[in-house]
Image (cartoon, rainbow, N blue to C red):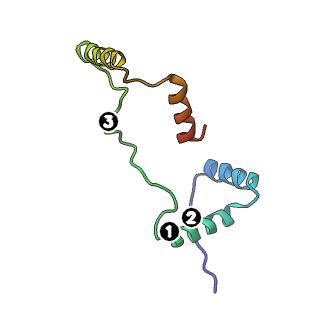
Amino acid sequence: MASTIQVRVDDDLKMKSDMLFKDLGTDTTTAIRMFLTQAVANNGFPFEIKRNTVYYSPYAAMTEEEMLAKLEKSRKHGEEGKYREADAVISDMRSKYGL
């Protein structure tokens, strides 16, 4: 026996998801079935769920005093040889994030 699930979604979301799944060689119904199958197989969402809240941002505004302290620490590390070449850092980032 098969059950039917009805879900109301915004027209724009439906259109975009239909186009996406068509480009991926499937349809929205099959994609939803795949999602449900993976949710059961993973015993939860088949992807990571995160809050949008950022608890710490390295880009938050700093006071002039904080900035000068960080620059001083950076200079000391440089003098002590505690640094990495930019190419090595970029290579690590590309590996980590698949760039």
Of label 2 and label 1, which has the lower sequence position? 2
For the residue pair 22 and 24, the one nearer the viewer reads as 24
Q: Residue at 37% of width from left, 20% of height from top?
A: 81
State which mark lies toward you, 2 or 1.
1
Up the image or down, 11 lies above or below 62; here it is below
Mark 2 and mark 3: span between their CA atoms?
A: 36 Å
How many residues crowd around disc 2 within 10 Å: few (fewer than 14), some, or many (20 or more)? few
How many residues crowd around disc 1 within 10 Å: few (fewer than 14), some, or many (20 or more)? few
Measured as percent of width and height from the top left, residue 2 is found at: 63, 82
Q: Residue at 75% of width from left, 51% of height from top?
A: 23
Secondary structure beneath disc 2? loop
Q: Residue at 60% of width from left, 80% of height from top?
A: 3
Q: Quadrant of residue 37?
A: bottom right
Up the image or down, 53 lies above or below 23; here it is above
Type of amino acid under label 3: Tyr
Is 90 on the left or on the right of 2, as rendered? Answer: left
Q: Quadrant of residue 56?
A: top left
Measured as percent of width and height from the top left, residue 93 is found at: 52, 35
Direction front: furthest residue: 80
For the residue pair 62 and 94, the one nearer the viewer reads as 94
Q: Residue at 64% of width from left, 54% of height from top?
A: 14
Type of amino acid under label 2: Val
Residue pointed to by mark 3: 56
CB within 8 Å, label 3 to label 1:
no
Up the image or down, 58 lies above or below 8; here it is above
Residue pointed to by mark 1: 42
Residue pointed to by mark 2: 7
Secondary structure beneath disc 1? helix
Mark 2 and mark 1: span between their CA atoms?
A: 22 Å
Type of amino acid under label 1: Asn
For the residue pair 41 and 80, the one nearer the viewer reads as 80
